Image (cartoon, rainbow, N blue to C red):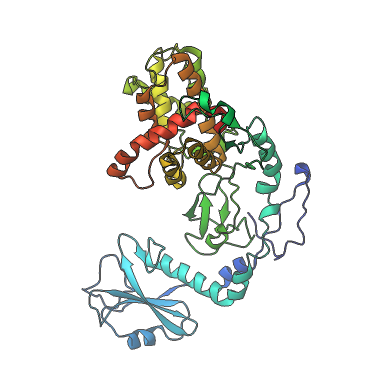
Amino acid sequence: MAASSNSSLSGSSLSSDPEDYQPPIWKSYLYQLQQESPRPKRITCPQEMESRPKYYGREFHGRVSREYADELLAGAEGAYLIRESQRQPGTHTLALRFGHQTLNYRLFYDGKHFVGEKRFESVHDLVTDALITLYIETKAAEYIARMTTNPIYEHLGYTSLLKDKTVHRLSRGRTEPRRVTFQRDDRRAAEIASPLVRRTVLKDAPEKQCSYEKIHNFKVHTFRGPHWCEYCANFMWGLIAQGVRCSDCGLNVHKQCSKLVPSDCQPDLRRIKKVFSCDLTTLVKAHNATRPMVVDMCIQEIELRGMKSEGLYRVSGFSEHIEDVRLAFDRDGDKADISASAYADINIIAGALKLYLRDLPIPVITFELYTKFIQAARIPNADTRLEAIHEGLLQLPPAHYETLRYLMAHLKRFCVLQGDHDAETWDRLGPTLMQPPEMNALTSLNDMRLQKLVVQLMIEHEDVLF
């Protein structure tokens, strides 16, 4: 990505037509400052130091005072040396000349050299990065403070060209969550034998507006060669760890800019390494779907040939065969063969579905909402309890809501065909779909009955809860 001498976006050509799209002009001011920054100058010790650690070179001067180090570095911007502290023998200090003064930093080594968060292969690289950072942050402090005020992010191809297509795609075939009110029909109250069996009345209420938002999965990244921030269009300075990159979509931004980027990550399939144990929303967006293909394909296969299989979700298939299914999905995605010719035992497919749901890094009922569902299950009044569960469902991320809705509809059909509601099935599915935020064996044990009740109610009242 080449730099431009123009430091504004006035020359950008923006168009709603993808064919006419022209990238914005990248701002070069910070890049120019990096080019101007002082170069490191190693001040070597004229004599061999027996106390020199093996991971330092001739820049190590032994146990000398700050004043002596200052004399050695005087007049040479970017000059540096390493000395052993007189006050704390055995510890080492990097003395660096910048801005006509000597700066002293406690220097550490754990296989790499560091004075702060960044870790370097060599002291020379550490000093190079420090000089760049010091120079830019001294010369351009005000510029850096306001560089996020006029972002180009909305004009980048990443957002402007994907936005309409993504919204249109994800809106097709998606069922908007309905807000419902559960109340007793007094005229039939006497006819109702169980307090859990209630007549539901749908009332007009604002529908929840769904959007498959996904936060970016930013991680500190070292860019090889010049790179510009895709949020503010400014250069990402430094030698290593200049910024962050989204590991799901590849967006590159400054660390400070990452806090301002909208939750609009559009994962790139090439960056998704596996299907199982992948965040649900990430997988759904990467595959342009409303639900994970594992859930769709396994349920479709079960409904094709396993709905009358007794004990389907209680009896486990052979673990090695379930592992084969997992590997097939990780390797082949939606091309995985889970047909009867590949796996005659339908329990293997049901086991793979349970394994997928159990291995999600964030459960279908998210950690954040776990307590809300448990508290709802404690409510003694049946109608109020259902309303509380319904409110919790409306707060689920869209991909989680769609997955749960599809799964509950399937389990409802399964229970109707089986002619019973097997308590052991609820016992097994509860911990699969919801887990406490902190994995505590005692909490899980105490909540098991309530988890079972939540799953049971979602299946029995699937037609009105979703």
Residue drawn at the location 43% of the way across and 35% of the way down: 454
Horizontal relation, residue 438 to residue 198: left or right: left
Residue drawn at the location 75% of the way across and 43% of the way down: 18
- Give residue 125's quadrant in the image: bottom left
- Give residue 288's quadrant in the image: top right
Quadrant of the drawing holding the C terminus: top right
- State the residue in front, 370 or 278: 370
The answer to whether any part of residue 368 appears in the image is: yes
- State the residue in front, 93 or 413: 413
Exactly how many numbered labels are in the figure? 0
Instruction: Provide residue 110's location: percent of width, then percent of height.
Output: 30, 61
- Give residue 37's quadrant in the image: bottom right
Instruction: Provide residue 234's location: percent of width, then percent of height.
Output: 62, 62
Instruction: Provide residue 447's location: percent of width, then percent of height.
Output: 34, 40
Residue drawn at the location 21% of the way across and 73% of the way down: 50
Horizontal relation, residue 408 to residue 205: left or right: left
Quadrant of the drawing holding the N terminus: bottom right
Instruction: Provide residue 272's location: percent of width, then percent of height.
Output: 50, 38
The answer to whether any part of residue 224 appears in the image is: no
- State the residue in front, 244 or 169: 169
Horizontal relation, residue 460 to residue 113: left or right: right
- State the residue in front, 87 or 298: 298
